[in-house]
Amino acid sequence: MLSLALIGFFGGLITGISPCILPVLPVIFFSGGVQGAGAPTDAAAPARVSRWRPFLVIGGLVVSFSLFTLIGSLLLTLLHLPQDVLRWAGLIVLVLIGVGLIVPRFEAILEKPFSWIPQRNVGTERGGFLLGLALGAVYVPCAGPVLAAITVAGSTGRIGPETVVLTVTFALGAAIPLLVFALAGRRVAQRVKAFRKHQRGIRIAGGVVMIALAIGLVFNVPQLLQRLIPDYTSALQDQFSNSKQISSALDLGGLVTDENKELSTCTNGAAELQSCGQAPSIRGIQQWFNTPGNQPVSLTAQKGKVVLVDFWAYSCINCQRSIPHVVAWNEAYRKLGLQVIGVHAPEYAFEKEPRNVEAGAANFGITYPVALDNNLSTWTNYRNRYWPAHYLIDASGAVRHIKFGEGDYGVTEKLIRELLVQANPGVQLPPTTDVTDVTPTGEVTPETFLGTTKQANFGGTEKYSAATGTFGMPKKQPADSFALDGGWTLGTQSITPTGAPADITLRYSAREVRMVLSGSGTVTYSVNGRSTSFPVSGTPNSYPLLSGKNLASGTLKVTVSPGVEAFSFTFG
């Protein structure tokens, strides 16, 4: 239990210093120092700011975040209420408190229901607990293994002492940086003469900030701001997420619940149908598209149909080779009772952006429903570990086949056809689809990430870190590795030339080589003395470099212009 508490606390602490908290920091700062109506405005007068106010604001946030995360989804489901009703309630309270700060008479109306509390100024002067409760309802920390485990446990109703400890310690860890800002606000209010002298203006500014936060949250403005700010905690997050000890303690990717415990009875890629229990629900989805009105798809509403749940990510080369088969199955069997559901589980931060996923889906010809599983809640609920992964569900809602990774498309299609006949014995099936299986065979170079947090194939002699800005080619470069030459700026997920074009030399074994790129500029690659250039523009996408019929080994030199971000090489 102690180790679980430490994991929760440090996981929350890392989240609490990440860019995800930036939108709420101005409100937290003002909450620590704003005085109530009727407070002295004389610069010489002592500031009437309760010493406990910052602690009550953060305490309210911890309480509401913990309760909403653990039991909010379950209660709303039982009450048949929309999953975002708590968030909207929090936004409304934020607006009301903001108006109360600007209009003192309205503040008095807000305080009347709490007049029985000794410190009656709950919302705006000394208590602050109500403000904390509202912030806890709208506070959305960055996803990570701890939050994913908590979310799945809360969604499935599997809430035991371990889950409660994990949730509370995570909330406490995340709240500590916020408490520092709240205490700083109180300190400024007490010590800075201008702050005390202009309390009326400060109250109005605080109210405007709270209303602006609420409006910004409605239009997802904080998400846009977060994408403009580099995630300076990515390295810590990745080290924390990839720790075997932490993964084992959280059982992430294998979190066993009553809902999914029978999935382990299925054999990966079995040639015949199996019985693997009722399909786990699709949970924690940020957004749907390719559905009427972009409304959610419920598995319970698909009873009588054969369902294929496909976990994918749009920049994943393995998924790119698998998707044409899924698209073909959808086109061939949709009208005969097959429902394909694509669950997009992001591997990169840019894959969490809905417009990027929609563009990727359109490029692949995906017209079936797509769910954005940005917190990996459904991924975890299915105990998944792979891109791609296929879960085949029969007309009664039972999982009958699981396939992790690429290949065996003929087997999967054969089983789809069998289930369609079982569901409707009189169905007239068309011929099997004719999509070439391009699953790599032989020793292919593994996917090569270029960001500092995931790289594993660097063949240069320099230290691969953000502190290194200049690179040179090694005298001898190992097979299946890359090396840099010139000036480079290394980020946690991508790299970009500094000032002038710079080179990447890649030694590979593959039939196909692709590169995930974004930004604006030009990329030139050379192989066997021949050079080819192409433009790069827009959001991250996968660009083809080489393609052949047979597996081949070689050396590829890639010159990248400034303004282009390089994320990875993928191979087929």
Image: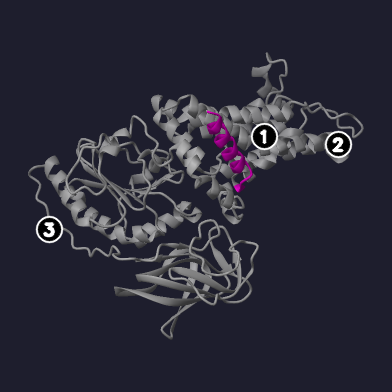
Residue drawn 32% across and 38% down?
298
409 is higher (above) or lower (below) than 489: above
Instruction: Determine crowd level at label 2: few under 14, some 14-19, many 20+ residues with C-alpha closer than 10 A.
Output: few
Which of the 4 image quadrants contains residue 440?
Answer: bottom left
Q: Residue furthest top?
A: 116
Q: Residue furthest bottom?
A: 529
Q: Which residue is mark 1?
A: 98
456 is higher (above) or lower (below) than 166: below
Residue 25: x and y, percent? Answer: 67, 41
Q: Describe the element under mark 1 as helix, strand or loop.
A: helix
Q: State which region is magenta.
A: 1-19
Residue 391: x and y, percent? Answer: 28, 45
**For residue 204, side relative to residue 331 (left or right):** right
Looking at the rendered structure, which numbered label has been put on residue 191? 2
Q: Nearer the viewer, residue 12 or 336?
A: 12
**In the rendered image, which quarter contains the C terminus?**
bottom left
C-alpha span from label 2 to label 3: 80 Å
Q: Are marks 3 and 1 in contact (CB under 8 Å)?
A: no
Q: Which residue is mark 3?
A: 431
User: Disc 2 marks which amino acid?
Assistant: Arg
Mark closest to the chain's N terminus, 2 or 3: 2
Taken as a whole, is the magenta stretch helix, strand or loop? helix
Residue 55: x and y, percent? Answer: 70, 28
Q: For residue 253: magenta?
A: no
**For residue 201, side relative to residue 410 (left or right):** right
Q: Nearer the viewer, residue 21 or 217?
A: 21
